[in-house]
Amino acid sequence: MKILKSALIGCALLFSFYRIAIGADVDWPKKPIVAIVAFPAGGSTDSFARNIASNLGEALGQSVMVDNRPGAGGMIGLQAAAKAAPDGYTIFFGALTNQAISHSLFANATVDMRKDLTPVALMGTIPHLLVVNPSVPAKNLTELIAFIKSKNGNFNYASQGNGSLSHIEATLFMQRIGATGTHVPYKGSSFALPDLIAGNTLMMFDSVTASLPHIQSGKLRAIAMASAERSPLLPNVPTLSQEGMKNFDVENLYAVYVPKGTPPAIVDRLDNALAKIAANKNNQARLASQGIRVHYENAEHLAVITNTEFEKWAKIVKSANLKID
């Protein structure tokens, strides 16, 4: 009996040391969790994040509250997440592609999600497309290029903000067609779209999720998909590649991260919960109706994908000779 008692005490001590070593709290979460989103409410990142937050809260038994921190191509939200306590009560729902671009574009970037955050899970992608105000006479890419060139630089085009995927798409597009215009950056789709609809700007690269309702209502016209494939929600809209502009296949990757130093046990629990959310058929269908493609990858794979995205966009930004102070 004494031997058994000693063994049990030894196991308990070992378990305690293990908990201390990884910083795990078996009762986590004991209070609401904050999900930082680096773009404003109403955009594609926000829509995707709120869907995940709702499901994650249900899975964990605590509410997950979205905290929008827009600005600087996602860098403001990223900085807030990086500075948060690594206790499992702050997560970052990031538009990975945007963050990779911003890191290369902003000369004074002080935060690097590869070093300051821990990857948890890739959750999906949202394709982008080129949309114009209906006053633009162009109905296809060839006509749009001719129209842009006829303006001799005297027109405005919108983006989701300096350093955003929307920004670099427009810049690369203008370089490819050999034209100029005035770039008007906003803090996200929800701020840019009203001006585009009003005719204050004439074109924009935007997510399917944010632009779809306005395309369906006739307030915007879709010219071409910037992704490799057509969207099932807009089957009659060709890709830029199909319209003759090759090697312009872009999608924004969306993933969940936590501050560096968050206990591995919490990361694992988050990863497991997110995997189940991604596998849910009803949730997949609901997201698909918004133009969101669910694509889950675990923390280990996300780490590789994150590095790949950063390397890819660093080369593109350098080749385009872009920089933001």
Image (spheres, helix red, strand yellow):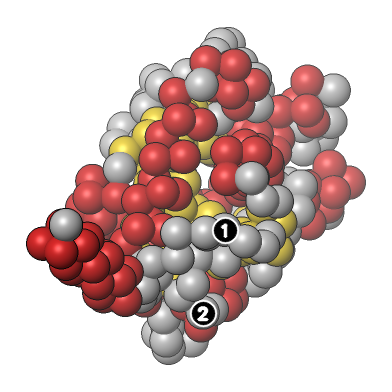
Few, some or many residues within 10 Å of mark 2 (<14, 14–19, 20+): some
Tell me if 134 is positioned left or right of 112 in this view: right
Quarter of the figure that contains the N terminus: bottom left
Separation of residues labelled 2 and 1 (CA atoms):
14 Å
Front one among 319 and 275: 275
- In screen coordinates, is 209 left or right of 111? right
214 in relation to 14, above or below: above
Q: In which quarter of the image is residue 31?
A: bottom right
Q: Can residue 250 be seen in this view?
A: no
Q: In this view, does 87 lie to the left or right of 295?
A: right
The residue identified by callout 2 is 85
Please tell me which residue is depicted at 83% across the width and 52% down the height of the picture.
Answer: 195
Q: Which residue is drawn at 11% across and 62% down?
A: 3
Residue 270: image location, x then y, percent: 44, 49
- Describe residue 63's horizontal placement relative to residue 18 as left or right: right
Kindly indicate the quadrant of the structure image that contains residue 284.
Answer: top right
Which residue is located at x 57 percent, y 45 percent?
60
Q: Where is residue 207 in the image (x, y as percent from the top left)?
A: 60, 39
Secondary structure beneath disc 2?
A: loop
Front one among 170 and 215? 215
Q: Identify the residue position indicated by label 1 in the image.
A: 29
Disc with the residue nearer the chain's start (2 vs 1): 1
User: Please, what secondary structure does the residue beneath circle 1 have?
Assistant: loop
Q: In this view, does 289 lie above or below 155?
A: above
Dot 2 amino acid type: Ala
Residue 211 on image: x %, y %: 70, 35
Please provide percent x and percent y for residue 126: 51, 36
Q: Which amino acid does label 1 sit on?
A: Pro
Q: Residues within 10 Å of mark 1 (few under 14, many from 20)?
A: some
Which residue, as the protein is rendered here, is positioned at the far left?
Answer: 3
Task: Name above or below for residue 68 compared with residue 232.
Answer: below
Is residue 4 visible to the viewer in this orientation of the structure? yes
